[in-house]
Image (cartoon, rainbow, N blue to C red):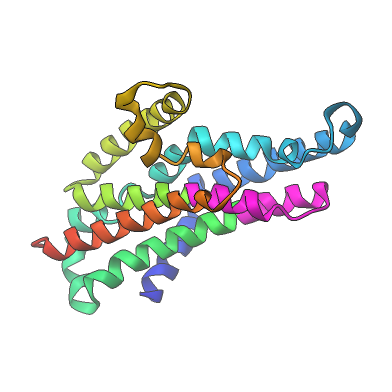
Amino acid sequence: MLAIATKEFVEMMKSFKSLFIIALFVLSSYFMSSFVSKNVVSIGTDTNNYVSVTRILILLFGFLFVLMLSHDLISRETSTKTIRFLITKTSRTSIIVGKFLGVAAFWLFSLGISITIVSFFAKDFLWFTFLQLYSFLIFAIGLCLLISTLAKTTGMSMLLGLAVSFIAPIVGFWSMFSEKTWLKPFKLLLPYQYQIKENGLVLIPLIIGLLFICISIWHFKRGDY
């Protein structure tokens, strides 16, 4: 399990797309925080001002970033038949959990750097903001892994990933500001409304993300590879 997680993390860190996303988070956090700290009189001292760009990036493009980097976590192994080798060396549960831990570690690293930069300028580590945003990312990672487990090919997982990346933010924000009955299930399921909570409800996306992992394990165990 740990070997799989380490391999996944290292491979992501060597990817140009991953390095681009890390650079985007770091630079946007630095310049926004620097701007706020220099204009604190006119903008105010609210810590949300420092983290605003990072929050916008994750809420609007979080699904796209996660699915762009990891849509083929399992479908890649299935398409190339390397999954047959993996399942002879370790348990199917270890494969899924290892993949999840590797991707989760990458986003922990990426978000951690961004929040640390913001916290330096804000002169206070933004633990709760970090928890909110990381909970959102765990939801996206869990859904990404589920899609990759259900998809038979990398092309299918990419197509499903792109569809989710564009539809989820639209439906998520729409459900937050609409009273339509048919949108209420999406409001409860998607992680957007929990970003404005100030209590333990921010952990609900994380819990749902872990539920996606459990479903992925259940389906993966039943698969004939």
Q: Is residue 130 magenta?
A: yes
Image point (40%, 56%), residue name: 207
**Horizontal side of residue 173 vs 46, given as left or right:** left
Q: Is residue 184 magenta?
A: no
Residue toward you, 160 or 175: 175
For this orientation, the residue located farthest to the right is 41
> Main SS type for the magenta part?
helix
Residue toward you, 37 or 45: 45
Question: In which quadrant will I find the C terminus?
Answer: bottom left
Magenta extent: 112-136
Image point (43%, 40%), residue name: 63
**Horizontal side of residue 193 vs 212, given as left or right:** right
Give coordinates of residue 50: x percent, y percent. Answer: 74, 39
Q: Is residue 88 above or below residue 37?
A: below
Image point (44%, 70%), residue name: 6
Image point (88%, 34%), residue name: 40
